[in-house]
Amino acid sequence: MSRLLEESRELIEANAFANHNHIVVEDIQPDFARVTLDIVPDSLNLRGFVHGGALFTLADVCSGMTARTDGRYYVTSQATANFVRGAKEGKLTATSKVVHRGKTSCLIEVEIRDDADKLVYQGSCTYFCITPEGGQDPALKK
């Protein structure tokens, strides 16, 4: 397992909300991440589809992991969400990639697909850098 993947999984394990939503980092490389969400009853809305908040959370976690692949830490400053189709069961897979990386911000595109590889969600997120390269994330200070 790569050091980047190991660090990303540790970061997710420290995130109670990501754990509550059954989110797992599957793959991470410079400027790219693949993250999954197992659909469980708590993921569903009243109509039996995955709740939009769960989809947005998965997209934000995936794209946030992608932003952090440069060794710096970020917070979400803006996001767009396009809910394309519903999903009811199985596993959702989010993939994201860097579109632009600057000194203080990073723009990420993200997609979520179901087990049949059908597009469920498409969006973009802009992140603001909160630490210099190699700096410690304030949320993880022990």
Image (spheres, helix red, strand yellow):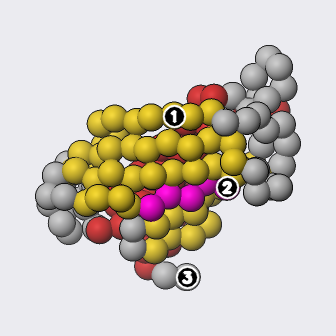
**Mark 1 Cα within 10 Å, few/some/many (few <14, many 20+)?**
some
Q: Which residue is mark 1?
A: 81
Is-magenta flag for residue 3?
Answer: no
Gap between marks 3 and 1, in whole Å? 32 Å
In percent of width and height, residue 50 lies at 74, 33
If you read the primary sequence from the N terminus, does the residue marked by circle 3 or circle 2 appear first? 3
Locate residue 77: give its quadrant: top left
Task: Determine the secondary structure under disc 1.
Answer: strand
**Residue type, numbered disc 3:** Met
* Front disc: 1 or 2: 1
* Front disc: 3 or 1: 1
**Residue type, numbered disc 2:** Thr
Q: Which residue is mark 2?
A: 93
Does any portion of residue 15 appear in the rendered image? Answer: no
Q: Residue at x 38, y 61 (%)?
A: 98
In the rendered structure, the answer to whether residue 125 lies left or right of residue 105 reads: right
Q: Which residue is mark 3?
A: 1
Nearest to the observer: residue 140 or residue 90: 90
Task: Please tell me whether residue 31 is drawn above or below residue 73 in the rendered image.
Answer: below
In percent of width and height, residue 127 lies at 30, 46
Give the residues in magenta.
93-97
If you read the primary sequence from the N terminus, does the residue marked by circle 3 or circle 1 appear first? 3
